[in-house]
Image (cartoon, rainbow, N blue to C red):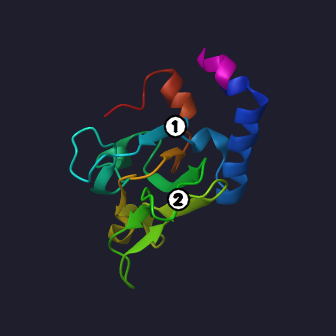
């Protein structure tokens, strides 16, 4: 199943596009994580899907063969109404918070590390997935590592 999926021409084209944009080879990229968020009846409902403020930096990755996550690319696969929530909110930018509204075909790319020192987390790129209130949200996460992720993954050498 995994190889059939990875050999699909559309999957390969998307992976190559991520590589072209980031200028990082495809093998450095984790396998895409597809996400789906349903609309919530109210903000604090326990059935709501969202992510609170976090970083894609993982402590300990610096000691693994694939190295740290340099970048995250998030692709929006559908539109969410302007008043429907579901944005990606960057909470700690120097100019203040910024929310990117989901729109089909839009992608956001951000670093997890400092450009001056890829061994250190960039705390400015903390972010959260805002609650969807109208419609639904589909997206794809791509985490791009410093070194080859896929070869070590095949032999089980990517775990902490």
**Which one is nearer the viewer's eye here, 112 or 42?**
42
- 25 lies above or below 70: above
**Which one is nearer the viewer's eye here, 142 or 121?**
142
Q: Is residue 140 left or right of residue 125?
A: right
Which residue occupies 44% across, 47% down? 67
> In this figure, which residue is indicated by the disc labeled 2?
81
SS state under label 2: loop
Say the numbered circle drawn on residue 34. Answer: 1
Q: Mark 1 packing: few (<14 Cα in 10 Å), some, or many (20+)?
A: few
Secondary structure predominantly adopted by residues drawn in magenta:
helix
Which residue occupies 56% across, 40% down? 148
- 52 lies above or below 152: below
Which residue occupies 37% across, 49% down? 62
Q: Position of residue 111 (x, y in %)?
A: 48, 63
Say the numbered circle drawn on residue 51. Answer: none
Quarter occupied by the C terminus: top left
Is residue 2 magenta-colored? yes
Q: Is residue 70 left or right of residue 52?
A: right
**Mark 1 against mark 2, which lies toward the viewer?**
2
**Which one is nearer the viewer's eye here, 90 or 67?**
90
Q: Position of residue 59 (x, y in %)?
A: 28, 49
Q: Position of residue 138 (x, y in %)?
A: 53, 43
Spatial CA distance of label 1 from label 2 is 20 Å
Quarter occupied by the N terminus: top right
- Which comes sooner in the sequence, label 1 or label 2? 1
Report the magenta residues as a range: 1-5
């Amino acid at each position: 199943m995994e190889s059939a999926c990875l050999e699909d021409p559309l999957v390969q084209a998307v992976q190559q596009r991520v590589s072209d944009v980031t200028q990082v080879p495809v093998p450095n990229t984790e396998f895409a994580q597809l996400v789906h968020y349903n609309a919530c009846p109210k903000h604090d409902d326990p059935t709501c899907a969202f992510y609170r403020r976090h970083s894609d930096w993982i402590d300990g990755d610096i000691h693994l063969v694939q190295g740290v996550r340099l970048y995250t690319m998030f692709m929006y696969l559908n539109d969410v109404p302007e008043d429907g929530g579901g944005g990606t909110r960057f909470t700690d930018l120097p100019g203040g918070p910024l929310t990117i509204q989901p729109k089909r075909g839009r992608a956001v790319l951000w670093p997890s590390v400092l450009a001056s020192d890829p061994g250190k987390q960039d705390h400015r790129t903390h972010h959260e997935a805002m609650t969807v209130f109208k419609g639904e949200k589909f997206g794809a996460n791509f985490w791009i590592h410093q070194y080859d992720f896929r070869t070590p993954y095949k032999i089980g050498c990517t775990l902490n």
